[in-house]
Amino acid sequence: MTPLIERYLHNVRLSLSGPRRDDIVRELAEDIRTQVADREAELGRAMTEPEQEALLKQFGHPLALATRYGPQRHVIGPALFPVYWMVLKVALGGALAVNVAIAIALLVTGSPADRALGHLGSFPFTTAIMVFGWVTLVFALLDLNLPRLLEHAWADMKGLTLPRPAEAKGRSWTLVAEIVGSTAFLIWWLAIPGSPFLIFGPAAAFLDRAPIWHQLYLPIALIWLASLAGLWAVLLRPDWSRVRTVGRFLSDGLSLVLAAILLHADAVVQLAPGVEATEKMVGVVRFINAQARIVFLIWLLASLWQIVHAIYRVVTATSTGPDGKTA
Amino acid sequence: MARPTDDPTDDDPTADDKALFENLRLELRRGGLVLAVLGQLRTEHYGYTLRKALAERGLPVDEGTLYPLLRRLETQGLLTSEWREEDKREKRFYRLSDAGRRIVRQLDAEWRGLNASIARILEDE
């Protein structure tokens, strides 16, 4: 066997995995040897290097050849990829919106401009990678379980369910309730700066909000306002189902990002200015911050669950179309 | 307005047409190739002679397609194989397993039915 052929087979072997690779290379070597012997008998001389190259080219690139021996692999298959792509775009867009809002809030609250811009500049390397990683991980897990999920969805034909008028009416009342609740929250939120009592009650005498609140105050107000606008849009235009779906993803994604930011904050509560930092008071603040961290963790997990559930609903609804055919 | 049928552009496939045809041709061939390999292995062969036999019957197949396919069919239990010496050389011989024979009979009937149906459909056009 010539050095060229040996080099080729060595590269095929390197690209293969599993216990069968020596056997596969042995078989390929035998085929090449037979072809060379036949060709040389025909020519009445040894094959030249270009002739050997032409022979090996028929087998294909070592990596391409080795790949054909393995099972077909993908992280996210064609059935889920369109939904994955849409969710990824919405999640990245939402995360970017939050980052822009935080940068604006930093500027408005008098933080140095380089800090605000640095926060925004770090987006592709921190938040974007995190969002990409989480979304991809969730979809990879969904893809692994897709046949089971579809079977489960198809068992009660979830993808075919049409809203009955009574349900549509019920949904309107739920929406109205959501709008009332959201408006009440927004009014409460906007009133907080003038009255910390609205958060802490009587404890406002010795407790105050930590700096993270000032950074997130405006973004949260804007997000809530946008969410309220979305609810009105859905109420007035029930046919905008795409707006509803995208809005739900956006709202859940933003909620996830906010929970993550608050979870990473050093503290959410601090002693009010002028209050003596006695051991007891510091202990109380530390206890409240520890409890708040647990709440933020639960919030983060709940938001993650909401996203997974929303994706599941979209997948099962789009994968089992109204004609009963799976995508 | 409909284009006249004698328009010379109708007979000149574009680069896109060629690429599309090639994709569809490979898709069409893929299933047929499995049946051809299984059918040919009713008689025992090793890779090189199998390729020659297929080529002689008008179905050339490159090594990079054939050898992985043989391994896959063996993993699926349709083929059995063994290393054996022939002409003072060790070769891996393949043949149909019992399950492979049953499957080939079913696939053969399916292929003929499909062929006849497609022929009827194309004749109608």
Image: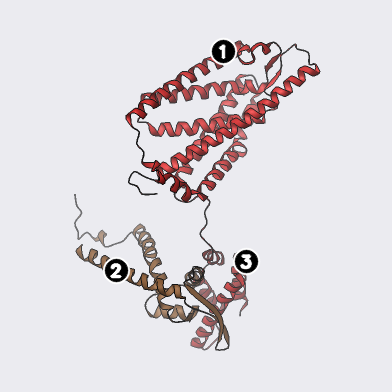
Chain colours: A red, B brown
Dot 1 amino acid type: Ala
Query: Do marks 1 and 2 share a subunit?
Result: no
| Mark 1 and mark 2: Cα distance apart in space | 77 Å
User: What residue is rendered at 78% in x and 13% in y?
Assistant: A276
Q: Nearer the viewer, mark 3 or mark 1?
A: 1
Residue drawn where x is 20% and y is 54% of the image? B3
Q: Amino acid at mark 3?
A: Leu
The amino acid beneath tag 2 is Gly
Task: Report the Cα–Cα distance between label 3 and label 2.
Answer: 44 Å
Q: Quadrant of the C terminus of chain B?
A: bottom left
Q: Is residue B60 visible?
A: no
Residue A176 at x, y = what percent? Answer: 42, 21
Which residue appears at 51% of the width and 59% of the height?
A72
**Chain of the residue displaying label 3:** A
* Disc number placed over residue A14 in the picture, else none: 3
In the rendering, at what x and y percent does residue B84 appear? 56, 83
Name the quadrant containing residue B23. Answer: bottom left
Identify the subunit bearing mark 1: A
- Provide the chain ID for the residue under circle 2: B
Residue of label 1:
A191
Q: CA distance from mark 3 to mark 1?
A: 67 Å
- Mark 3 or mark 2: which is in front? 2
In the displayed structure, B8 sits above or below A122; it is below
